[in-house]
Each structure stands twice: as structure tokens, then as C-alpha cells.
Image (cartoon, rainbow, N blue to C red):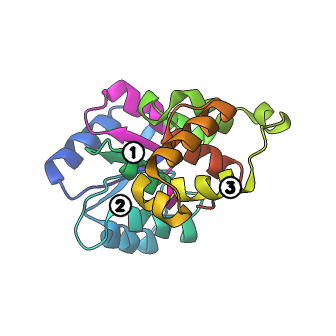
Amino acid sequence: MISVALVDDHKLLRSGLSNFIKTDPGFQVLFEADNGLDLQEKIKAGKAPNVILMDINMPLMDGYEATRWLHIHHPQVKVIALSMYDGEECIIRMLRSGARGYLLKDTEPAELARAIQETHQNGFYYTPMVTRHIASLINDNESDKKATPGLTERETELLQYMASELTYKEIADKMFLSPKTIEGHREKMCEKLQLKTRVGLVMYAIKNGIVKV
């Protein structure tokens, strides 16, 4: 049985999620929490769950900080971000914080159940929104045996900036380049690595140890 915890300050939504999860005999809801601080207290007082569904925007301690705390103190707990935000900045920031998956709150119930199962079993779950085309880089152990195209020192530096919260203009300023040149380098790296988006590049960087979470 997979133990699940829900961390969200919207009690009505949290209650609906809890009721849905309880209908699956393979899941159990270990506890619910209003925010990251409440989560910390409940984990310290009892057993840590296998999987946590984590909201991002919460008072006192948000999902980013709570996920980072879990990554440091309870790395065995797998976090799936469950948010209304679909911007790449939010996705990248949660992945950098240690989240293993990212779902929107309008996700179909069947996909939510599948995400919990696969995250528990495989360690990751990524929807098309979080670039399905890079899932094999994370879940396929054989990919570790394949040679990956080398990156130049300049490309590696850019990739590290891409995995931050900086905008393209801010990255350009740091690298003393124009935003248009940065976009061109990004497109070349995507072509070289057979990726399509900035999120894909970030996941490649995490997978290959270029960026640490």
C-alpha cells in the first residue's frame, strides 16, 4: 500500500483529493497539512509518507521551501507538485527544489492515481506539459549507458543559468550576450540534445549532474 500525504491550504480541495485517494485500495492517506510548517510538525510527530501531493502557493511555508526541506531531511519521500500554475518558471523551480513530478489541479483523477503509482515505483512522473520527450532520460536505465553529446564550457554555463529562475534577458546580461544570442544557443542545445523546451534542458542538466537539486 502506498501512503500519501496532502499539503494544501485549500481545505475543500484537499478534502476532495483525500476522498478520491481513499477509494483506491492501493492507497492510504497518512495525513493532511495546511502548509510546509504543518507538514514538518506532522512528519516529526509520526511516520513519513511514500508520496506527497504538494501545493505551491501556501502561507507560512510554501511548496518550494517545503519540498527543499523534504529533499534534505527525508529524501526517500517523493513529492508531486499539484498546482494551478503551468508556467515554466514554476515547474523549473519545483524540480530544482526536488519535486519528482508536476501536475495541474485540473488533472483527471485517473492520471493523478497513475502519477502516484509511477512516482512511488519509478521515482518520477512527467506529463506532456513537463516534456514527455525527456521521460526516457530519467526512467530508462539503458540511457545511462549511451553516449550523450558533449557540451562546450559555454553551453554548460548557459545550461546552469537556464536551470535558475533568471529570465532570458537576465541570463544574457550575466553572459554579456544579447537575448537573441541566448535564444540561438538554447535552440542549438535543444537540437544537439534532441530536446524541445527549457524544462527539457533543465531535466537533462539534473539527470547528468550538471545541476544539483
Residue at the image position 22 percent from the left and 68 percent from the top: 59
Residue 212 coordinates in the image, percent (x, y): 63, 61
Q: Which residue does the numbered mark 3 point to in the structure image?
A: 154
Q: Identify residue type, mark 2.
A: Gly
Q: Which mark is residue 63?
A: 2
- State whether residue 32 is above or below residue 35: above
Say whether disc 3 or disc 1 marks the residue closer to the N-terminus: 1
Residue 136 coordinates in the image, percent (x, y): 65, 30
Q: In the visual, does 92 lie left or right of 9? A: right
Query: Of 54 and 145, which appears nearest the observer?
Result: 145
Q: Identify residue type, mark 1.
A: Glu
Q: Is residue 98 visible?
A: no
- State whether residue 81 is above or below residue 136: below
Q: Are marks 3 and 2 in contact (CB under 8 Å)?
A: no
Q: Identify residue type, mark 3.
A: Arg
Query: Of 59 and 1, which appears nearest the observer?
Result: 59
Say whether disc 2 or disc 1 marks the residue closer to the N-terminus: 2
